């Protein structure tokens, strides 16, 4: 699977888009949140990689800063 942090994906259980936050290929898991973000933020949750059905070719960049 060609999956990267920041990619937008669809899940088997939903037609909505989700943004990939983190990926653990060794344990076949990833963390996603609903995209676009809700006004007060979107909760992050963990899912098995096999639940991802479609990925977009356009990645949404994530800024990670060390404050």
Image: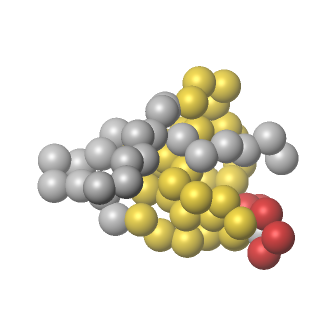
Where, by quadrant of the figure, is residue 6 drawn? top right
- Residue at the image point whose x is 79% and y is 63% from the top: 25
Horizontal relation, residue 45 to residue 59: left or right:
left
Residue drawn 71% across the image and 66% down it: 24
Q: Quadrant of the C terminus?
A: bottom left
Q: Is residue 9 visible?
A: no
Q: Check the image and report above or below for 47 versus 9.
A: below
Residue 32: x and y in percent read 51, 58
Image coordinates for residue 12, horizontal then vertical, percent: 65, 56
Vertically, is 16 above or below 40?
A: above
Up the image or down, 59 lies above or below 6; here it is above
Is 38 placed left or right of 34 in the picture?
A: left
Question: Is residue 8 at all visible to an observer of this figure?
Answer: yes
Which residue is located at x 34 percent, y 65 percent?
43
- Which of the colour schemes (rainbow, by chain, secondary structure, one colour) is used? secondary structure
* Residue at the image point whose x is 61% and y is 69% from the top: 47
Q: How many marks?
A: 0
């Amino acid at each position: 699977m060609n999956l990267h942090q920041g990619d937008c994906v669809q899940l088997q259980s939903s037609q909505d888009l989700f943004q990939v936050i983190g990926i653990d290929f060794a344990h076949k898991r990833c963390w996603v949140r609903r995209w676009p973000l809700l006004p007060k933020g979107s909760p992050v949750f963990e899912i098995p990689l096999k639940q991802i059905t479609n990925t977009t070719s356009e990645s949404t960049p994530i800024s990670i800063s060390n404050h």
